[in-house]
Amino acid sequence: MALRPRRVRDVARGGDRPANAGAFGQATTQCITETGSPAGELTDGMPHAATEGTVFCIPQTASATVNLVADLPGPGATSLPGMAQLHF
């Protein structure tokens, strides 16, 4: 999964432009990826390590102050390591 830099409507210029350069404090960011790892063969009934990864958009809030301080709308990313096991 990947997120492109967010865009805002630039009325003065009549088009879209990035709200801020980059993401996560890195001005050169062009794409955000998060990589997980599959649990592998689950039919053996044993626990296997796995990691889920996702990127998402955080919408702006109703508060202009919060949006300014948190630089919203903006990207979010997370990963969740854990164990996967099938019980039959």
Image (spheres, helix red, strand yellow):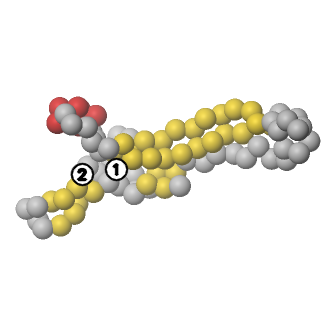
In the drawing, does residue 48 fall left or right of residue 71? right
Q: Is residue 16 left or right of residue 1?
A: left
- At x 82%, y 38%, the residue is 86
Q: CA distance from mark 1 to mark 2?
A: 9 Å
Taking 14 as reference, is 8 above or below it?
Answer: above
As rendered, which of 81 and 22 lies closer to the eye? Answer: 81
Residue at 19% over, 34% down? 63
Q: Is residue 28 visible?
A: no
- Mark nearer the viewer, 1 or 2: 2
Would residue 63 be seen by someone viewing this image from the given angle?
A: yes
Residue 16, horizontal then vertical, whole percent: 22, 63
The image position of residue 9, as x and y in percent, is 19, 59
Q: Quadrant of residue 15?
A: bottom left
Q: Within 10 angstroms of label 2, few (less than 14), some, or many (20 or more) residues?
A: some
Residue 45 numbered tag: none
The C terminus lies in which quarter of the figure? top right
Q: Nearer the viewer, residue 62 or 20?
A: 62
Mark 1 element type: loop
Residue drawn at (34%, 50%) of the image: 22
Identity of the residue furthest to the front in this view = 88
The residue carrying mark 1 is: 22
Image spot of residue 62 (x, y percent):
21, 37
Q: Quadrant of residue 65?
A: top left
Residue density around tag 1, few if under 14, some if 14–19, many if 20 or more, within 10 Å? some
Q: Secondary structure at mark 2?
A: loop
- Residue 19 is labelled as 2
Residue 77 horizontal/vertical position (percent):
48, 41
Q: Residue at x 39, y 47 (%)?
A: 57
Q: What's the amino acid at mark 1?
A: Gly
Tally of numbered tags: 2
Amino acid type of the residue that numbered disc 2 sits on in the rendered structure: Ala
